[in-house]
Image (cartoon, rainbow, N blue to C red):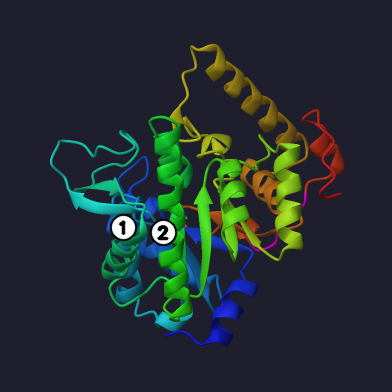
Amino acid sequence: MLSDNKQQELVQNLPPVIFGTSSLGNLYQAVDYSVKREVVKACIASSKPVAFFDSAGKYGAGLALESLGKCLADLQIDPQQVVISNKLGWYRTPLLAPEPTFEVGIWKDIDHDAVQMISYDGILKCFEQGNELLGNYQAQMVSVHDPDEYLFASNGEADYKERYQQILDAYMALAELKAAGLVSSIGVGAKDWKIIQAIAADIELDWVMIANSLTIKSHPADLIAFIKELNQKNIKVINSAIFNGGFLTGGDFYNYQPVDGDSSAGKALLDWRDKFYQVCKTFELLPAEACFSFSAGFPGVKSIALNTTHGPKRWLLTPRWPKKKFLLGFGRKCKHRD
């Protein structure tokens, strides 16, 4: 059980980088366990005294949580040396078909399926299963994962309202876990930041994790204003998926959807990326470095969640902020960082 002081300390002192674990769940490609272990080892080595990991039951239908726990145990890492965030709402189930039924084509060579479970009882089941998969380790930071997807799957206004109430019920369960000292903090993780905005108006949150929303490719003014508002309320912002699902660093998926180079939308994305790479080359910046520095530069953004299959890059330790001329190269005056 965590003390009140420890709970507050974990919330207030988020590190600049939180290590994502979707690759441990075989996102886009199957990764050998030995590689996963070396990645976790590198993350631990670069994060003194405590390493923060972000995971979810959705990642590989629990494989990421399972792999993270096994890696930490095999490396003999003291549980006090790690803080784990588990985004809850997806529950591992047996695989009854050749492929998983959720996010088809995204997770490779996994042996389980997953179903969305967002409710008071469902979120507690996800929390318990997540800790079981982690083995000797436990999640200290918890949130409801993908409430936006859950709402968008509703069938009409009545169903939408019922689902939103289920989300609120899930947060009631998380608040009870926090009050009992079983977790340190409560947040929300979603791709649609406007759903985060709605939940933040109804729930007392410690932090929010936005995904695919505040990147060098996409950074709407109203989202920046919302982050400023959260900062004024002392609600921490973790910015994740800052490469738009890997696309900005050369991947074939944009926000986890395949890019069709023959379509007008796909051509526009590829053209934008080509221009981005040319500007990076002009200013002698790695695309990943530019993405990281830009996405971390907004007041209120306390951490960047990064996923890797190769361990932390050296530029993360001393990132360079892009010059104003670099930012103007994308046709927009960005005032968050000079």
Look at label 2 and name its amino acid: Ala
Q: Is residue 255 above or below residue 79?
A: above
SS label for mark 2: helix
Q: Is residue 80 visible?
A: yes
On the image, the x and y values in percent for residue 59 come to 36, 51
Residue 326 in the magenta stretch? The answer is no
- Mark count: 2
SS label for mark 1: helix
State the residue at coordinates (47%, 24%).
259
- Left/right placement of residue 288 relative to residue 109 reads right
State the residue at coordinates (42%, 30%).
156
Residue 318 in the magenta stretch? The answer is yes
Furthest toward the front, the residue is 158
On-image quarter of the N terminus: bottom left
- Left/right placement of residue 286 relative to residue 259 reads right
State the residue at coordinates (53%, 77%).
50
Q: Considering only order in the chain, which callout, 1 or 2, is on the residue closer to the N terminus?
A: 1
Q: Which residue is mark 1?
A: 122
Look at label 1 and name its amino acid: Gly
Mark 1 residue crowding within 10 angstroms, few (<14) / some (14–19) / many (20+): many
The span shown in magenta is: 317-321
Q: Are marks 2 and 1 in contact (CB under 8 Å)?
A: yes
Q: Is residue 324 above or below residue 144?
A: above
Q: Nearer the viewer, residue 172 or 98?
A: 172
Q: Which numbered disc covers residue 170?
A: 2
